Image: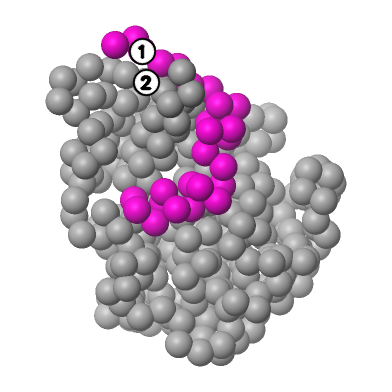
Amino acid sequence: MALTLIDASQVEELLPMADCIQVMRDAMMATSVGRLEIPPRQSIPVGDGHAMLFMPGSAKELGFYGTKLITLHSDNPSKGKPAIQGLITLFDYDTGEPVAIIDGTSVTGLRTAAASGLATDLLARESSTSLGIYGCGLQARTHIDAVCAVRPIEKILVWGRNGANTEAFVEKEAARTGLAIHAVSDPVQAAACDILCTVTGSADPILFGDWVAPGTHINLVGSHSLNTREADSTLIQRSQLYIDSMESTRNEGGNIMTPISEGVIDEGHIIGEIGQLAAGDITGRTDDHQVTVYSSLGVTSQDLFAAVSVYRRLQERR
């Protein structure tokens, strides 16, 4: 069996966002019932605040196992490069033969946003028409696509810590999508939207509970360690709270574990995993006044399901 190399352009072509959201539904339901072997990801410091992350996993039901190896250089956007770069390797489940190497940056951007799209579809008010984005990197772009795939978004407000970068992002995205996208200098303005996505590299809160109107749905995406968070404790306390993985949350979920350590909430405040919600095992939004939050850390099952889907679709074309 030949080793297949799949680049970023092929990933984007083979797995459109709407399709990937459905793939993430399957991935998260499989995760929540424990059908996969997914050890905790390992993070190796490489100096200057940079890190290399190793994320292995095995899915018998897919017929593959593999790993994602990525680097995290948070200062890369200032150099015109993605903060996250890497690759995914796939191996045949029965023989152990390597079958594919897939661009990891594109899969990460796609599957993370698609998981948020799934959460948005399950939790956001049907009448939601405005989107507030915090951040202006790759995840900001893919989250625009994901949210617009599940709700009729008419207006998008983007806030970033660097005004010039935010303006450039907005201009590019407005041209790409044809949507009404505007930069805002005050983060409170973005918080007035029906749906919010935080996709920054901030270590400290950039979204506060006092800003958020009743009925808002929020995807917290950017932070992924116990000592970083994008939301303050007030927001978490007043929300209906959903996560991707309880194990990951305990290991890396600063957005949630910090309020727990402060005594503001306890683990019982977490309603459950998004896979449980997708399967109908737990309750979602019950009225239009609730603030719902999905805390996303990313799990290897998302990478495996997305990578296998890309690989199989390519094989079907040959």
The answer to the question of whether label 1 and label 2 lie on touching residues, with beta carbons closer than 8 A, is yes
**Looking at the picture, does residue 147 appear above or below residue 299?**
below
- Tell me, yes or no, whether the highlighted magenta stretch contains residue 226: no
Q: Position of residue 289 (x, y in %)?
A: 56, 89
Q: Quarter holding the N terminus?
A: top left
Amino acid type, mark 1: Leu
Looking at the picture, tell me which residue is in the foreground, 205 or 283: 283
Place residue 311 in its image quadrant: top left
Give the residue pinned by disc 1: 3
Q: Residue at x 41, y 16 (%)?
A: 4
Q: Residue at x 46, y 18 (%)?
A: 318
Secondary element at tag 1: loop
Secondary element at tag 2: strand
Looking at the picture, tell me which residue is in the foreground, 93 or 234: 93
Q: Which residues are magenta?
A: 1-27
Give the residue pinned by disc 2: 100
From the viewer's perspective, is 97 left or right of 87? Answer: left
Residue sticking out furthest to the top: 2
Q: Residues within 10 Å of mark 1 (few under 14, many from 20)?
A: few
From the viewer's perspective, is 148 left or right of 102? Answer: right
